[in-house]
Amino acid sequence: MTTKFPIASTLFALFLFSPALALFGNTSTKAAEIYSAACASCHGSDGRGAPISQVGFDLPLPDFTDCNFAVREPDSDWNAVAHAGGPARAFSRLMPAFGDALGPEELQLATAHVRTFCTDNAWPPGEFNLPRMLVIEKAFPEDEAVFESAVAAQGDGAVSNAIVYEKRFGARNQFELSVPFGRQERATADGGGWQGGIGDIAAGVKRTLFFSRVTGSIFSVAGEVLFPTGDREKGFGRGTTIFEPFLSFGQILPSEFFLQSQAGAAIPVDTQRADNRGFFRFGTGRTFTQGQFGRSWSPMIELLGARDLVAGRTFQWDLVPQIQVTLSRRQHIMMNVGVRTPLTDARSRDTQVLFYFLWDWFDGGLFTGW
């Protein structure tokens, strides 16, 4: 929840002049009046912020017209800090708690008015940043660094890892770079052993085409290119460049439920080394909050289908139950663990334990926010 200005200072300034709330009491339901009475003296009527010399403290004030700052996070995060104070999200104690002075409706109205200072409607709001699933690529453009791992639970030993870097640019775009690596047990002339190597490095771009607060839907198109950097003979690569276009969809449902889906294809340059392949993925889940503003738990399940586009081939289906949990108080560090179980061709395909560790680096440092 931070950019160049910490949200603690944002909300500290937003409600600094709380005595002015007595002018209309807790009965007011007008967002503009709440902002004008409680916040404008500090942030100005245009939301750009008054000079530090005028407000009397040295915390830098944010610019609410900066859409990259004002829209990125969901209302629930803003309201958590306003209600319970800065420590609720590991921010400064200078941000007091206003849960006793302002009701949930007043806090939500103040946040809603702050949102109006971003006049560019191209930015998807943070509510569409649904929990990241283990396999499905979500539709929301994000700034994240992820360590992914898949461990064979049966058969020959194998550990596949990847470091994924995602960078948002503009209102709706994201660049992604994935570097896979791993180790696997293989039979060799001297009796077998473990071998390691780099896999096929992938680079991609994603763009959000549509989102709607009314329907709670978000839809994106993306494309990745997998380069043949892995050793095909050792099983770490496909031996050819592969293009992977796909579509991603997210849907917010009532009562903290949500669903996500992805459909696409893998198109190799050399079909002698890899077959054309189509895939469809569907997932659903629900987020539970520990206490009023505490840790988030998101149990989810994915159904994965894929088929080589070759005559006689059939769909392969996998099921992936999983749970994501936020680790830091700021909720920008999280992990997910699940099991990928083959529903078809189970004799030739192994069950895997999947895991990721995620750092939403836009919201704070790896060692901050705890």
Image (cartoon, grey):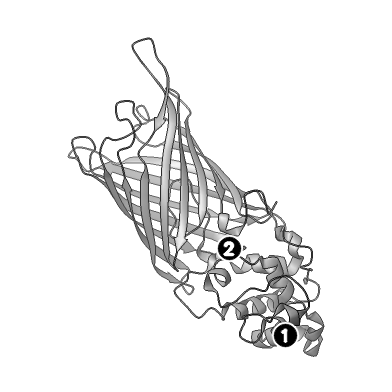
Residue sitting at x 67%, y 51%: 328
Residue sitting at x 49%, y 73%: 213
Q: Would you name the residue on which mark 1 appears?
A: 41
Q: Which residue is nearer to you in this view: 129 or 105?
A: 129
Residue sitting at x 78%, y 72%: 98
Q: What is the quadrant of residue 308 in the picture?
A: top left
Left or right side of 359 for 155: left
Q: Position of residue 148 (x, y in %)?
A: 49, 41
Residue 116 lies, with reference to residue 2, above or below; the image says: below
Q: Residue furthest front?
A: 53
Q: Would you name the residue on which mark 2 appears?
A: 255
Q: What is the quadrant of residue 186 in the picture?
A: top left
Q: Position of residue 267 (x, y in %)?
A: 24, 46
Residue 244 lies, with reference to residue 149, above or below; the image says: below
Tell me the crowding category of disc 1: few under 14, some 14 to 19, or many 20 or more residues within 10 angstroms, Cα based. some
Left or right side of 86 for 77: left
Q: Position of residue 250 (x, y in %)?
A: 44, 61
Q: Secondary structure at mark 2?
A: helix
Q: Position of residue 108 (x, y in %)?
A: 66, 75
Pointer 2 or 1: first along the chain: 1
Quarter of the image that includes the N terminus: bottom right
Tell me the crowding category of disc 2: few under 14, some 14 to 19, or many 20 or more residues within 10 angstroms, Cα based. few
Residue 370 lies, with reference to residue 99, above or below; the image says: above
Residue 29 appears in the figure: no
